[in-house]
Image (cartoon, helix red, strand yellow):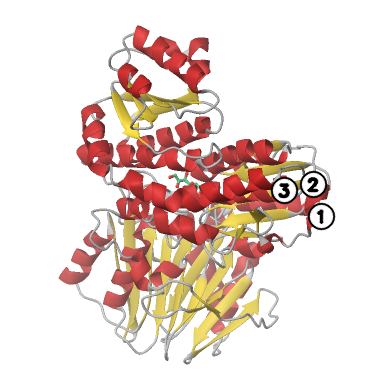
Amino acid sequence: MCGILGYAGGREATDLLLEGLRRLEYRGYDSAGLCLLDGPGIAVRKCAGRIDSLAQLVGASPVHGSTGISHTRWATHGEPTDANAHPHLDRSGKLALVHNGVVENYLEIRARLASKGHAFLSQTDSEVLAHLIGEHYDRLPPSPDRLLAAVRDALPEVTGTYGIAIVHADHTGEIVGARRGSPLVLGIGENEFLLSSDVTALVAHTRDVVYLNDHDLVWIADGSYQLTSLTRAQIDREVRKVEWDSEAAQRGDFAHFMLKEIFEQPASLENVMRGRLDWENCSARLGGLNMTPRELRQIDRIMIVACGTALHAGMVGEYLIEELAHLPVEVDFASEARYRNSPLDSRTLVFVVSQSGETADTLAAMREVQRKGLRALGICNVVGSTIARESDGGVYMHAGPEIGVAATKSFTSQVAVFALLGLLLGRLRHLTAPAGRDILEALQALPSQVSEILKYNDAIRAVAEKYAASSDMLFLGRQANYPIGLEGALKLKEISYIHADACPSAEIKHGVIALISPDFPAVIICPRDGVYEKNLSNLQEIKARKGRVIAVAHPDDKTVASMADDILPVPETHPIAQPILNVIPLQLFAYHIAVALGRDVDKPRNLAKSVTVE
Ligand code: F6R
C-alpha cells in the first residue's frame, strides 16, 4: 500500500526513481511524486495519476540530483490530487518526506502546529508528519546528524504506522528512514544506497538488502549507513541476499502480470513442493515449522487467520487438514481475529497466511496471539517480510514475485502448503502410508496437470467472452471447492468489476436461488468426487429456473456437458489436490472477462497489492 523509493549515491537519480516507481506501482497508483536535492535547493514534482503522468511532468520540467526520494500513492487521507501526492515539505520548504501508513493522531498534531503558525497545503496526515519533523529540526543546533536527530525526536509523538524516507536541502547525500508497521528495506549497492518499501524496486540495482524492523531508524550519509533504534541503540542487522533477480519481476511477452503469473503456476507449484515430499515416510517435510513430531502430535486445534485470497486458501486448508488429520480447524478474517476474544490454549496452533507478509490486519492478529503466549506460524511468499520474520516458524511459498494485484500463483502455493501440512499432521496421527503415498503422487502430478489446463486458455477465453456482458455472477461448489468458488468470485469482482457472489451449492435453496435468471449465470465446480451427484442436482435446479450454467468439470464428463451451457475444463486428481486444479480455469475466466471489458487488469481501480493499513 503506497510505494517508497529513495536513492543516495553517485548516479543521476531522476530516471532511476521513475523506473523504480514503475516497479512499485502495483502497491498504489492514484498519484505519484519525487524530489531531488538539486544544488542548494530541493526540487519536487508530483501529480495525481499514474507514474506515466509524473514522467511527463518531469519531462516537461526536468529535475536533477543524485539524492532523492519518491512515492506512488494509495490514498488514505485526502483524495488523489496533486496537493495530496507525496513528497510533502515542511514549513521551511527544505525538508521533504514520503510516507506509507497512517498517522492516527494527525489532527491533534496538525492543530498544535497550526497554532504555531504552520500552514498546510494538503489534507494528508503525511504532510503533518513532515511539518512535525521540520519543527524538531529547526529547534536543534547544527550538527552532522541533525536530520536524524529531528526524526528521532519527532517520532515518539506519533501514534499510528509509518514507513518514511526524509531528505533535507542542507544534507545532500543523506536520507533518513524509519519504520513502524509499514515495511522498509535498505538496498546496499556499490557506492550507493537505496531505501524502499519493497525489494521489487531494489533488485535492478542490488540484491544485498537489510530489512528494517519496527522502531528502527536508518541514516544514509557520507557513503555509508547506520542503523539505530529510537532509543539511540546501535543495531547490527544481517545483510541478506534477495533470492530472485529483476528478470523475475518483468512482464516478458505476457500482456499482463496476472496472465504471466497464472502461467507460472506449474513452476511455482514445483517450487513450493521442492524438497518437501517425503517419499520414504509417505509424508511431508516442513522443517521451517520448527516443531518436533511430538509437539505436532500434541496440537489439538488449528486456527488460520488471513485476508482476502489468503483467507480463501485457509478455508481450503480447513477442509484438507480436517480430512487428513482429523483436527478441528477454524478460519477467521485477520481483521476480526485481532479484536476477538477467541478461547485459545497452548494446544492451539495458529497459522497466519500472507503472500506479502505485510498485511496490517494479519500482522496484528499474529502479534495478538503471540502476546497470549501461543505459537504463530507464517505461510508467506516474501522472504524477509515482517510476518516471516516475526512468526515462530513457518513455510515459505517460494512463488517468486507476484506483481499483478489479483493474487493467483500465491493462492495455489498456499493451498499446496496446506495439503502438505495436512499430510504431515495426518501421518503423525492415523493416516496410513498408502493413503499418504496417494497424496504425494497427486501433488507431484500437479505441475503437469496445471500445464494441461493452461493449454485450454483459448477455449476458456471463448467462454469468458460469452459471459463478459453479465452484470452479476454466482459461484457454487461443495466442500473444499466452496472456497474455490469464493476465490473465483473474488477474482471476477476485483478485476472485471462484475458483481459476483459464492455459496456452497446446496445453500442456493435457502435464498440465493431467487436471483437466478437468464441474465444471472452461475459457475458450478463439479468434479467427480463424493458430492458429484449432489452438485448435479444443484445444477439442475438452476437450469430448471432458466439460469445459464458454466461448469468446471472434466472435459470427458458427458453428464455435466449435457446439462451445462459451457464447460471450463480440468483434469481429475485426488480430492485433496483437486481444488488447486479447479481454481486455474476460474483465474483465466476472470482474466479474460476483464480483458474483454477493457479493464486495467494488473491495477484494478481502488486496490493496491499490499494492504499495510488497517
Ligand atoms: C486478492 C488479493 C487480496 C490479498 C489480501 C491479503 O486477489 O490479492 O485479497 O489476498 O489483501 O494479502 P496478503 O496475502 O499479502 O496478506
Image check: 455 left or right of 273? left
Packing grade of label 3 (10 A; few <14, some 14-19, many >=20) is many
Residue under the point 45% across and 78% down: 207
Badge 1 amino acid: Glu
Question: In whole angstroms, how far apart are the C-alphas of marks 3 and 2?
Answer: 14 Å
Q: Find residue 299 and name its label.
A: 2
Secondary structure of the residue carrying tag 2 is loop
Packing grade of label 1 (10 A; few <14, some 14-19, many >=20) is few
Residue named by callout 1 = 295
Any part of residue 91 in sight: no
Residue named by callout 3 = 427
Badge 2 amino acid: Ile
Quadrant in the picture for the N terminus: bottom left
Badge 3 amino acid: Arg
Extreme-left residue of the structure: 60
Secondary structure of the residue carrying tag 3 is helix
Query: In the image, which is nearer the foreground, mark 3 or mark 2?
Result: 3
